[in-house]
Amino acid sequence: MRYPQRTGRLSFPGRKAQLAAAALLLATTITACGGDDGDGAKSGAPKAPASIPALTQDPLTLSFIWFEWPPAHALEEFANAEYKKERPNVTIKVNTVPNANWHDAMFTQFAARKTDFDIAILDSQHIGEAVTNGNILDITDFVKKNIDVTAYNPYLLAAYGQFPQAETGKRDENASLYGLPLLGDTWTMIYRKDLIGEKPPQTWDEMISVAQKCQTDNPGVSGLAFHQANGSDAAAVTYNTVNGVYGGNLWNAKDRKIDGVLNDQAGQEAMDVLVNKMKPLTAKGSGNWFIDEVNASVAQGKACIAFQWIAASGGLLDPKQSTLGTTREQILTKLGFATLPTQKTNLVPLGGMGMHISAYSAKQNQAEALNFMKWFEQADIQKKWAAAGGVPARTDALQSPEFLNASPFNQVYADSVPRMRDMWNVPEYARLVDIENTNVNAALNGAKQPKDALNDIAKEQQKVLDSSNRKGGGGL
């Protein structure tokens, strides 16, 4: 999943540039050459024990790596308050990096076969790269013995831990698991109830029409605000969402076919809608907006309708960050949160991520990580996590009053779970998403014609898949 990043590419000065480039080259080499037997199923991932080994009673710090955003701080605070009740000798540390550095911060260490973290919080699409290179533990046997898998929507359990991935909405019971859910997420539509009315638009076409009227009727307020940046997966998720609701597909996973699928008639219609109908309703200079900028636009009363990740929306209700009211209640008289409109389909993007244990962590830390994961996935702990601001994956926690009453957009997430669609969950993900981000951003900013941009994405992504000599795929 896909979160806040400043626009532009990561750059390192001087010696740091040389070290980073060398590490990335090593990571790329290992990805190309290691672990996989050609069908994407085999890996060098070491197996975790089915039973949790004896835990140390000495002081121990269990370290996570994530990116810098509010849920990371919420996790550290929550775990140190609650997990210490069971393990008072353990301190939880969630180390954060800018989102632009997130993938590289993990995988450069993985490539060096030495990590300063015990638990990597991976995007769903990162799993294949980590598994095929043997970077994370295979926890299949541990899960069978310690986790009630029936307590989860099968797709969520698969999305945040399974490789190879099954078709969206399904879980392959025979596939291995390499992680467990930490945070679920999807997009919510945020709308100004005081400007467009209490009832949100029900179709994408209606949404565009309503946004156009709102923009015309309210000078200085843009009709839409959404992610457009060429970084992380900002622009790519936006296009993929529109692609989905207009009936498009990102690829044929079985045949690993992108060219001719992504850029078919439905895909071209989606790109036309995004660039020629939605983009004109956004604020001037918004061509590199991501989460922070969309939130600022909403909080300042400058957008009629916006799209945002649910887990990044909490600050919108903070009067200290908003001009829409001096209290949470006042803000909620103006802001509404709804599931995404439908069109030809009802698909929404899958967000969120899972916990994965570093294969290079010390044995006593790996044992503690297993114990933490077992503790975290309990029903009562998941409900407490929900009340603390987390987005749980267990069905009972998702349906609990602790979650549904915690924030006005939590019901949106619960209602959206059956509609989710993810990207390509393959080891080549990082290269695929970079191609898509660059070209969608170019189309949104007028540097490429929409049709040319989509055809370029399809052709370049196809070359990446064809050059990898793998078979099959997953995630869609």
Image (cartoon, rainbow, N blue to C red):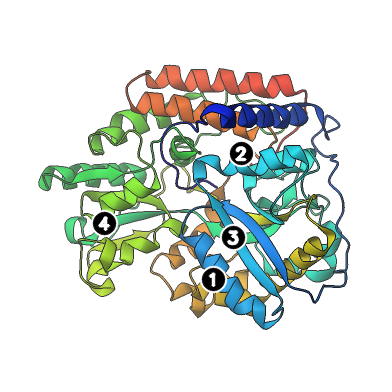
Amino acid at circle 4:
Ala
Q: Which residue is mark 4?
A: 299
Q: Amino acid at mark 1?
A: Glu
Q: CA distance from mark 4 to mark 1?
A: 26 Å
Question: Residue at the spot x=83%, y=29% of the render?
Answer: 38
- Residue identifier under label 3: 94
Is residue 112 shown above or below 291? above
Q: Are marks 3 and 2 in contact (CB under 8 Å)?
A: no
Callout 2, which amino acid? Answer: Asp
Earlier-in-chain disc, 3 versus 1? 1
> Depth check: 248 or 98 in front?
98
Seen in the picture, residue 266 relative to 64 is either above or below; the reply is: above
Q: Between 59 and 225, which is closer to the camera in this rendering?
A: 59
Position of residue 215 measured from the top left corner of the image (x, y, whole percent): 17, 44
Mark 3–mark 4 CB contact (< 8 Å) = no
Q: Write the residue at 58% across / 53% down.
A: 66
Res. 220 image quadrant: top left
**Amino acid type assigned to the residue bearing label 3 in the image:** Val
For this orientation, the residue located farthest to the bottom is 85
Label 4 crowd (10 A; few <14 / some 14-19 / many >=20):
many
Of circles 3 and 4, the one toward us is 3
Circle 1 — which element?
A: helix
Return the x and y of residue 426 as percentages of the image width and height: 69, 36
Cα distance in 3D space between marks 3 and 1:
9 Å
Q: Which labelled disc corresponds to residue 77?
A: 1
Query: Answer yes or no: do the residues labelled 2 and 1 have beta carbons within 8 Å?
Result: no
Disc on res. 104: 2
